[in-house]
Image: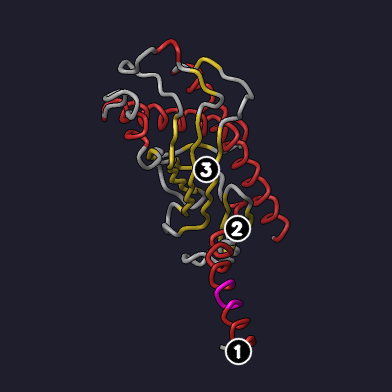
Amino acid sequence: MSKILKSLLLSFIMASAIAPAMAKDDPPEVSIEGLELVDKNRRGEIYADPDIDWSLYTQTMLDPATVAFRRHWQRDQNRSYAFKIRAKDMEKIKMEMSELFDEVFTKELSENGGYTITDQAGDNVMRIKPAIVDLDVYAPDTLNSPGRSTQFTESAGRMTLKLEIYDSVTGDLIAVASDRREAPRRGYMQWTTSVTNRAEAQRMLQRWARDLVKRLDEARGASKGDN
């Protein structure tokens, strides 16, 4: 094999290895639903319909948040102590997280965002379908946990929030957003309980809700400026 051919082959192999990594890091400019990329960072991205007049939407339908744990979360939690986490524990955590999401987002959208929360579709109503995925509670506090008073962690956990926003009348998907976050690492170990876990989850949800209100305000302002 000639040196030139070897060089070409090596270049091809390197390009093939790099391409998947680049594809993973760089989301497409247009989603499969036809939405355009608005923003991206290391945690996630936002897509939206460029032709939507956001200033028309003054009310919000907020669906209950679905919640899913990180893959193998239960298995990993039960490695050191069998049956530490049972199915009923997972259902309880998911239910509490969904209820907390509704409480936080309803308050932020209505009080800080000026949106009326409604359960009826209408021309000025957008429908938000939230999903919390990859939920990873580092030290869940359950009745089955051994040494419940001696669980110490540096961080409460992490999760990803996915939002789909629809026109409530037509059912058209007008925006999607995804964001991954971890509770702050304190730099020291701290006693972890259900109370501290809930407080950290509430802070993360508040940041997401306030970010959503800010984004919607910006979009509504831009839409008014275009009219």
When the figure is inspected, residue 152 is found, relative to residue 134, above or below; the finding is: above
86 displayed left or right of 141: left
Residue that badge 3 annotates: 59
Rendered location of residue 213, percent (x, y): 61, 40
Quadrant position of residue 68: top left
Mark whose residue sits in front, 1 or 3: 1
Rendered location of residue 129, percent (x, y): 43, 46
Q: Nearer the viewer, residue 123 or 8?
A: 8
Label 2 Cα crowd, 10 Å radius (few <14 / some 14-19 / many 20+): some
Do the CB atoms of the residues marked 1 and 2 lie less than 8 Å apart? no
Do the CB atoms of the residues marked 1 and 3 lie less than 8 Å apart? no
Residue that badge 1 annotates: 2
Q: Nearer the viewer, residue 69 or 106?
A: 69
Does the image show residue 110? no
How many labels sit on residues? 3
Q: Say which quadrant the N terminus sits in.
A: bottom right
142 displayed left or right of 166: left
Helix, strand or loop at mark 3: strand
- Real-space Cα distance between discs 2 and 3? 14 Å
Range of residues picked out in magenta: 10-14
Three-letter amino acid code at the position of disc 3: Gln
Three-letter amino acid code at the position of disc 1: Ser
Q: Which residue is depicted at the point 35% across and 15% down?
A: 146
Helix, strand or loop at mark 2: loop
Mark whose residue sits in front, 1 or 2: 1
Q: Say which quadrant the C terminus sits in.
A: bottom right
Q: Which residue is depicted at the point 58% across and 71% down?
A: 14
In the drawing, what numbered circle is on residue 53? 2
Label 3 Cα crowd, 10 Å radius (few <14 / some 14-19 / many 20+): many
